[in-house]
Structure formats: C-alpha cells, structure tokens
Image: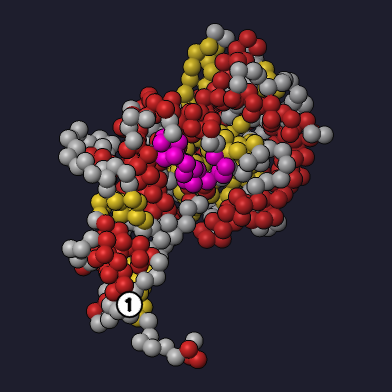
Amino acid sequence: MGDTMQGLPNRAGLGFKPEHFAAIRQSAASVGFFEVHAENYMGAGGLPHAQLAALRADYALSLHGVGLSIGGPGRLNRNHLMRLRTLCDRYEPESFSEHLAWSSHGADYLNDLLPLPYTEETLAIVCDHVDEVQEVLGRRMLLENPSTYVLFEQSTIPEVDFLTEVARRSGCGLLLDVNNVFVSATNHRMDARAYLAAFPLEMVGEVHLGGHDAEELPSGPLLIDAHGTPVAEPVWVLYAEAIARGGPRPTLIEWDNDLPEWPVLLAEAHRAQSMLDHQGGTALARAS
Amino acid sequence: MHAHREFIAAFDASLKGATLPPGVTACAPDETERRFAVYRNNVASSLTEALARRYPVIQRLVGAEFFAAMARLYAEAKRPRSPVLLEWGDSFPDFLAGFPPLQTYPYMADVAAIEFARGVAFHAADAPPAAPEVFASADPSRLRLRLHPSVQVLRLTSPAVSIWTLNQPGSAPAPLTQTQPEIALILRDRAFNVPVFAISAGDAALIEQLGQGATLMAAAEMAHWAEPQHDPQPLVLRLIQSGAILDAMETPECAPKSAL
C-alpha cells in the first residue's frame, strides 16, 4: 500500500454542490480542494459527471463515500466497491474516505450512518473491511470518526483506541471530524479535549468541520450532526487547538442541507484557511 | 462470534418498531429512547428527502405533509436495495396507483412516471450526437437513426404532461385545459436540460419505430398509419437539435449476402 498521505493539499476545501457550479466557475474560486459524495456520481453520465470532470481539471478532489457500511457484519457490497473503483479510476481523487458506521442491513440500504459497539469482534470486522477497500481501490483510505447519539453497554474499547487500532492494523489514515467529536462528547457528557488529546493526529489525512443542530433535553443538550448551519464557535476552538498541536491538515467545510449562497460557504472556507495560515506562521516562528 | 450480526438485526428492527436494541444506553438512561429516536428520524427523513428530490411535482400536488407521510410508508414497503439512491423510487408510480387515499386522482401515477423518467434521462449515459452533415444527402428509405439513451416515450392515461407542466415547484396555480390522455417525450438535451414534450400518436410511433431499428422511411409510414396527417419533419428536427440522434447510418442499397 503506497503512502498517499501527500494527497490533498493542507488547505481549506469545500463540499461541492451543483447549485454552486456557475458561481465557482465565474469566480475561479480559490479553494484548496472540493469534496463530493461518491454515491451522487454513480449514474452513467449527464450533468453530474460533466461538472465533476470540469472541477477536477482545476482542483484537487476528495471522494467521500457514505454507502459502504464498513461497520456492518458480513462481506462488503462488492458491486458498490466496484462502482467506487470505477469512480476512482475515472477521477483519480487525491483522497478517498468513508465512515466508522454501518448503513446497510442485508440488501436493505438505510441511508444513515448508524453506530456500532466497539468490541474485539467489530474491530476485526472493520479491519477486514478496510483491508478489502484498500485492496480493491489500490489506495490508502481515510476512516472518519462518527457523531453518535447513544452508547452501547457491550462496547469494551474507547472510540479513539478503536480508530487508532484500525489505522495501525490496516495502514489506513483517519479523517478527524471535529464537529463529530464535539457532538458526541456533548451528547455523552464527555470531554472533547480529552478525546482530541488521545487522537493520533499524525494519522489524520483530512479534517472535517460542519454545523450541528441542538435540542434541549432534561439532562442537557442533544446535538445532532445536521450540516445545515455554520461551524459552531466551540468547534472552531477545538479545531485551532488540533492544528496547533498536530500541524495543518486538509480541512473541509461540510454544508449539505439548507444550502447558503456561495459567498457564505466561501467565507467559512476562508476562516479555516486563515487559521491554517496562522498556524503555519506560528509553526515557522517556533522552528526559527 | 455472530454477536454483531445479531446486533445489527436487532438495531434495524428497533428502527422500524418501538423497542430498543439490546445494550443501548445514554448518559442519562431515561433519555435513551429519545436519543435513539434520532436514528429513526434520520433514516425516515433522509429517505423522504431523497424521494422528494426525485418527485418534486408529486410533492407539490399532494402537499409536503401528505408527501412525507406517504414517503414513510413507501420507504417501509420498498426500502432502497442499493446505496446509489438515484436508482431508488422506480416503483413509486405503481405505489401511487395502488395507494388508497389517491384513488380519485388517477393522474398521480402518470405524473410520477414522468418524474422518474426524467431522472433516468438526467443520469443516462453520455453519447455524442450525430454531425448535422450526415442528414443532408441521406436517402430516407435507407437511413437508420440511433437515438440517445435518454430518449423515452410514455403513453399516459391522463393529461399528465399538462399537469406536470402546470405544477412545477414555485409556479403560480393555473387552470388545466387539456382533458385527453397525453403521450410524453422525455430526453436530455445538449445543455443537460430534461424537457417533457406532449407528442402526437404519430410522433410516438415514429420514435418507437426508430428505437426498434426501422429506417426513417419505414418509421414515417408507421407514424402515418397511427396518425394520417402526420408530418415527421418537426419531430426529427427537434431530435436533431436536442442532440438526441447519435448517428445516422445508410444501410447498403443491396448488400450481397456473401459480403456480410
């Protein structure tokens, strides 16, 4: 497995939405990379592929899968894996990533990233699945930490240890979603800083930042990973701390629902970019 | 050994039902039910949104609330079988045809069939259109036209093309004047738009014959049989302008069998 950690540039990127295509082209937007959901480009042809091919010619590309069900039991969906390989062959993305979650049961696809208990059994399953993905795609993948709303009594391994062990055994990289860290930590009354302190930042090939919704329950807030609002302030703070410690990383702003106008999205990316630039400056200052 | 398989089955059963999967808990245990409900809601609402993206005119016709309730029933009955959601929803027109509350709205299934066909056309394989020169000197009796994979003809039981046209999301209400069943032509044009045209019985016969490999002359004869006053020229021009004709091959005048 070749080291493809050099893949995406250490810059701020944005999720590509077709609604923004004209604005991106007209402004020749300065964006470090674009990310797309792989499953939206599994039709045979037409506008989606025409747009993606045009973007790909000018920008680095991250292919982000949501349908492999890496955390599910049994074999991976071979047809789906082959569709991913076709996409990777066609667009040669700098990065491919998927989730520590499951989304299929048998032949049924549930269209959500569902949680799994962290046990020796599921660790072995996830490692096998990551191995299979990397073998079929012929590339290193990144595995993303999830947002979760419940816990499982059967879990015996902390999530960070689970992810670290998958990366160690399979050689995959990790995708650190800082919003997911904040959402899960808030929901489980745990310390997001402690989670990040334990996270193996040297294995992180990409960072995600996104917005969440909040609901007030009797015991406190329930946060929901909704990707329909700006990145929350506490998430920016955690992000700043993570890159100050681990160094700059390719950083994606995820905004999938209630899409804003392009300038609003671009402003979020610029904020991340200025933090990356500032972090680079402090790192240089430290080195001299 | 198979604990995870059993866990996933129990979790999925809990998504559909009222129980909780074994071992599920939360920092405030009495809120476990409420927190697990986030997953139930995510699955149902994400599938409703996926269906609404595919059937925006149906959503407008029945209203968002009715659509969401119906989409949940559909998603339970016909779960996606693939993570490629752009393929999901193919049986929604049939579901609407058999959905008891919509029995007095027989055009719903037709409108849904138009919307599904538009999705198929939108994602159909790319194929370069024929250069205009090839039509210039061609002999219609030997000319075979290959159609773009997005081209579809739907013979409907209601004036569903007019209903679809009048009920675009965001459009102002307008009276329906068409009462006769219509035939829809759906294709993807050179700018990736997917228009819907109401076409005549002759046009439909012409396209169906071309699709089956008939020569232009033979297809025009069938169109004339279906519609005595039919003039094939406007339709053929529209197909050429839309980029819906991929190539035009003149079959040899008399190909000796030995040469084949």
Residue at image coords 42%, 27%? B100
Residue A110 placement, left or right of B239: right
Quadrant in the rendering for residue B176: top left
Q: Residue furthest right?
A: B1
Determine whether A132 is above or below B97 in the image.
below
Q: Position of residue A127 (x, y in %)?
A: 74, 43
Crowding at label 1, few (<14), some or many (≥20) Cα neighbours within 10 Å? many
Q: Amino acid at mark 1?
A: Leu
Magenta region: B80-97
Can residue B102 be spotted in the picture? Answer: yes
Determine whether B200 is above or below B237 in the image.
above
As for residue A258 lying within the magenta part, the answer is no
Q: How is the image coloured?
A: secondary structure
The quadrant in which the N terminus of chain B is found is top right
Q: Position of residue A167 (x, y in %)?
A: 71, 43
Q: Position of residue B61 (x, y in %)?
A: 31, 32
Residue at image coords 58%, 53%? A84
Q: Position of residue B198 (x, y in %)?
A: 25, 51
Question: What count of labels does the image hold?
Answer: 1
Return the residue nearer the eye: A197 or A230.
Answer: A230
What secondary structure is found at the residue carrying circle 1?
strand
Determine whether B234 is above or below B42 in the image.
below
Residue at image coords 47%, 53%? A43
Chain holding disc 1: B
Return the residue nearer the eye: B19 or B101.
Answer: B101
Residue at image coords 64%, 18%? B19
What residue did someone put label 1 on? Answer: B143
Return the residue nearer the eye: B186 or A159.
Answer: B186
Can residue B239 be spotted in the picture? Answer: no
